[in-house]
Image (spheres, rainbow, N blue to C red):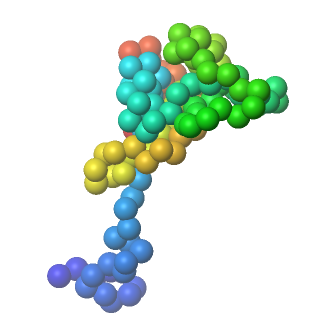
């Protein structure tokens, strides 16, 4: 049975057996809609003018001054901002964990190299 590095243990400590999360990055509209439905969020326009992007995902009641967005309006703004959606999934179950962030497509080389590559992990 293997040991774990300098510890001399034959089993990993509990912290190593905790659920790990993978990050998925996509620009596919269908993937984004499916993810949003699975985690229970919808696109909305925030009430703050200083936000980096003119869109957010909302669950539950909207903040005062915010407004729901149609998916068409969301994807127009999403493409104009030239971003991708990065979201977490539990490694074992592949279920989304609800965490997400919009990232510049320029920060993901696989999205910049080719128009045919639309998703990276």
The image shows residue 88 at horizontal and vertical percentages of 45, 45
Is residue 72 visible to the viewer in this orientation of the structure? yes
The image shows residue 97 at horizontal and vertical percentages of 43, 48
- In the image shown, does 52 or 108 lie closer to the viewer? 52
Give the residue at x 28% y 54%: 92
Is residue 117 visible to the viewer in this orientation of the structure? no
Left or right for 11, reference 82: left
The image shows residue 41 at horizontal and vertical percentages of 50, 33
Give the residue at x 65% y 32%: 62
Left or right for 105, reference 119: right
Check the picture and name the quadrant holding the C terminus: top left
Task: Establish if 22 lies above or below 24.
Answer: below
As drawn, the residue found furthest toward the right would be 50
Left or right for 70, reference 23: right
Left or right for 104, reference 38: right
Check the picture and name the quadrant holding the N terminus: bottom left
């Amino acid at each position: 049975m293997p040991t774990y590095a300098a510890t001399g243990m034959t089993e990993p400590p509990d912290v190593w057996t905790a659920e790990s999360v993978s990050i998925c990055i996509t620009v596919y509209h269908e993937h984004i809609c499916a993810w949003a439905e699975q985690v229970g969020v919808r696109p909305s326009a925030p009430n703050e003018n200083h936000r980096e992007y003119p869109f957010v995902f909302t669950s539950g009641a909207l903040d005062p001054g915010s407004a729901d967005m149609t998916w068409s309006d969301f994807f127009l703004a999403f493409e104009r901002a030239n971003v991708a959606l990065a979201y977490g999934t539990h490694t074992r179950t592949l279920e989304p964990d609800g965490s997400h962030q919009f990232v510049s497509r320029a920060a993901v080389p696989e999205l910049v190299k080719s128009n045919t590559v639309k998703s990276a992990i």
